[in-house]
Image: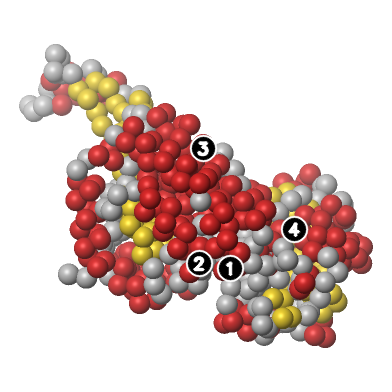
Amino acid sequence: MSEISEIIERQRAFFKSNQTLNVKFRLKYLNALYRAIKENLSELHEGLKLDLGKSESESYMCETGLALSELSYIKKHLKKFAKPKKVKTPLAQYPSKSYRLPSPYGTVLVMNPWNYPFLLSMEPLIDAIAAGNTVVLKLSAYSPNVNKAIAKVLESVFPRGYVDVLFGGAAVNSELLEHKFDYIFFTGSKRVGTIVYESAAKNLTPVTLELGGKSPCIVDKTANIPLAAKRIVWGKFLNLGQTCVAPDHIFCHKSVHDKLLSEIKKQIEKQFSKDPLVNPDYGKIINEKHFTRLLGLMNAEKTVYGGRTNAERLQIEPTVLDGVDFNDAVMQEEIFGPILPVITYEREEEVMSHISESPTPLALYLFSKNRKRIKKFTAELGFGGGCVNDVVIHLATPYMPFGGFKDSGMGAYHGRVGFETFTHYKSIVKKSTHLDLPMRYQPFKTFYQKLVKMFLH
């Protein structure tokens, strides 16, 4: 038996012990996880620094702090989430009570990406544990340093069989997907997501796929340009653009084009300094493969700001491309790096038409003061989620679900929706034994049939 088979068998045995059905049991481990994360913040942040060049402040703001926030929310509300939900009962089923009973799926596989390796491991894991499941966590091979810290935290909290951590690359992923899990939660590229979905289908395993795409950012002529530039620069170059919901490119109205570019340049220098490549808080591209890929998307002729690189440290400074069209290499794939193309438009119909005909993005951002336009864009365009007059922050809340749509994924999580994602709700009718109405039994008498019609209509 392979190591993976042994882990899955151990997890199934742990789940069948029924320990995880007890909400107090789940809370005990969620509380222990909260403490362990806080006790190991320095080691986690050091791992993120080594793998992605993230500063301590950015690591807390975008990874460990958000995970602790999700934990706090789930712990506070778990008892309420886990209670049976009473629902109305049709008169025809009198006398009885109806309710929906939250039940865990069983053994869950969580596959994390490398760009936010801690946050995107912890949040689905927290929700899965809260719902009463056991978890096999497969960590990305591209973030080895923080992976060690993640494994240390989880192994200090959870017994084997409750949560197990796996390392490795594509070969481990392939072997994992040959096994049957009760639920699969995947965050990553559309290409790998398709493989996961196909493998899950063979076992009729339900899945959540958090993918990505080219998330557009629209700046219309009514926008507050200095504020738009400030927020776009923050969201685009956070983690050097290696963020699934980063603004991929800008559609800028012709009338505010020059002002926006000027403000973007100012904000890059203000937030990252005039020489980001020597800024100790400026991160790095995850590996040489992605660094080389990004170089292929840059166009010196259309670069109006930035463009310098440091191959030794795998760094590309914030780079702005102007005069971009849809045939350029940078518009053929999700950028996932610190390159910001700007496309000028005159009529909003041009923008809506392009977005509607393109693969559905994970996020959409609109900077505008025009209420009619805001309503039109948010209602008529398809996308996973987004912001009006800001970027990225829609995922940093436990009060709204976060997830993709069509090409950018399926399913959602965070907060209550995260608990529900990893939960099957059993619909149960509890019927009284004191009274048994005869109308449903043969022989069907005329009088009873009249009663049935009255009850059902």
Q: CA distance from mark 2 to mark 4?
A: 26 Å
**Crowd tier of the residue under label 2, counting other residues whose Cα lies within 10 Å: few below 14, some 14–19, many 20 or above:** some
Q: Is residue 82 above or below residue 223?
A: above
Q: Secondary structure at mark 2?
A: helix
Q: Where residue 251 sits: x, y (%)?
A: 77, 65
**Crowd tier of the residue under label 1, counting other residues whose Cα lies within 10 Å: few below 14, some 14–19, many 20 or above:** some
Q: CA distance from mark 3 to mark 2?
A: 26 Å
Mark 4, residue position: 234
Q: Secondary structure at mark 1?
A: helix
Q: CA distance from mark 3 to mark 1?
A: 28 Å
Q: Is residue 413 visible?
A: no
Q: Name the front one of labels 4 and 3.
A: 3
| Mark closest to the chain's N terminus, 3 or 2 | 3
Q: Is residue 215 above or below residue 174?
A: above
Q: Is residue 174 visible?
A: yes
Q: Name the front one of labels 2 and 4.
A: 2
Q: CA distance from mark 4 to mark 3?
A: 26 Å
| Mark closest to the chain's N terminus, 3 or 1 | 1
| Mark closest to the chain's N terminus, 2 or 4 | 2
Q: Where residue 111 sits: x, y (%)?
A: 42, 62
Q: Write the residue at 42% across / 29% down.
A: 80
Q: How is the image coloured?
A: secondary structure
Cβ atoms under marks 3 and 2 closer than 8 Å:
no
**Crowd tier of the residue under label 3, counting other residues whose Cα lies within 10 Å: few below 14, some 14–19, many 20 or above:** some
Tag 1: residue type?
Leu
**In this view of the protein, which residue sits in the foreground, 221 or 307?**
307
Q: CA distance from mark 4 to mark 1?
A: 22 Å
Mark 1, residue position: 50
Q: Name the front one of labels 4 and 1.
A: 1
